[in-house]
Image: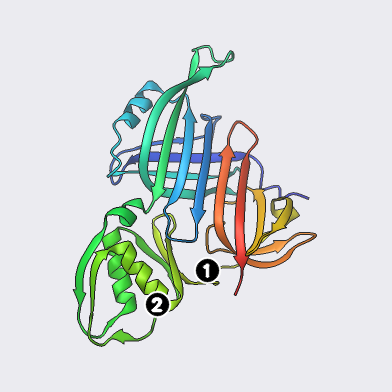
Amino acid sequence: MANPELFGRVYQLAVGPVGGEGRQWSNQGGPGLRVRFKVSKSGDSTPNKAEIAVYNLSADSRHFLDSYDPKTWAVRLSAGYEASGLQLLFSGSLELASNEKAGHRASHPQGPDWMTKVEGRDGVHAYRAIVLAESFGPNTSEEAVIKHVAKQMGVTIGTIKGLSKGKYNHGRALSGAARYELDALCKSRGLRWSIQDEVLQILPIGQGLDLTAFVIGPATGLVGSPERTETGVKFTSLLQGGINPGRLIQLESAYLKGVYIAENVDHTGDTHDYPWYTTVDAIHLS
């Protein structure tokens, strides 16, 4: 029997300048505008991506979005269910906002629909633009260096596992793109890094976050049958915003059972049509 909490689609979309006055749209408390989205996340350092379409924004809201600045604006999307509430699907930089007419609907007396496209990337400015030229004195820890790099990248510190407990006896110099410094440090320790909703995450390869495993089965939203892959398993469930790269997944199906690590996660939804899914490529737990 399906979980009754997985019914009644709700969303909240916020766009605007960081630290400034933005706009927010939601269907909580009313029918709301139609919103379609696809959020793609991965457990590696490639920036996560959100593609969102909003239908029939007011002329004032369309004009507001026309003034966006990709260097200073952000987008935040949450979605879920009426009973269990919203969960964050994406938080990152606004890369694109555009308006276009999307075709005529006979049921819409004002003529052609307006479709506003919103695209975001998570950690993209940190990935592209941050160059370091820093020196650290003797007895500096790896953790202190990582915290400094995260601050320069404009992200917060999340789960950091697998760093050396020792210190740099002769200090440490950083010179070059921040992402290359993180790549080098992680490679030397058998680690990998990613930015998830503007939070830096560093994990040993083959290990997940220290969170309770997310149980996925027929009673908790599993859609169809999971598929075995070369590295683990792939499955689809009803939308589960709590599943992000690195999250442990306890799969409970008739044919496949076990604990895996979410590697690639796609959240796909349409408030006025069929899709409201999370699709996960998960890898074996080491």
> Which of the marked residues, 1 or 2, is nearer the chain's N terminus?
2
Q: Quadrant of residue 154?
A: bottom left
The image's mark for residue 18 is none
Could you tell whether 36 is left or right of 189 in the image?
right
Whether residue 148 can be seen here: yes
Q: Residues within 10 Å of mark 1 (few under 14, many from 20)?
A: many
> Are the two marked residues, 1 and 2, in contact with CB atoms closer than 8 angstroms?
no
Q: Who's the residue at 31% across and 52% down the image?
A: 125
The image position of residue 248, as x and y in percent, is 59, 66
Q: Who's the residue at 30% across and 75% down the image?
A: 144
Q: Nearer the viewer, residue 146 or 206?
A: 206
The image's mark for residue 188 is 2
SS at badge 2: helix
Q: Quadrant of residue 271?
A: top right
The image position of residue 224, as x and y in percent, is 74, 49
Q: Amino acid at mark 2?
A: Ser
The CA span between labels 1 and 2 is 20 Å
Could you tell whether 127 is left or right of 131 in the image?
right
Quadrant of the rendering where the C terminus is positioned: bottom right
SS at badge 1: loop
Q: Who's the residue at 35% across and 24% down the image?
A: 60
In the picture shown, does residue 146 fall above or below 273? below
In the picture shown, does residue 35 fall above or below 93? above
The image position of residue 228, as x and y in percent, is 70, 60
Q: Nearer the viewer, residue 221 or 183?
A: 183
The image position of residue 148, as x and y in percent, is 27, 69
Q: Amino acid at mark 1?
A: Leu
The image's mark for residue 209 is 1
In the picture shown, does residue 25 fall above or below 176? above
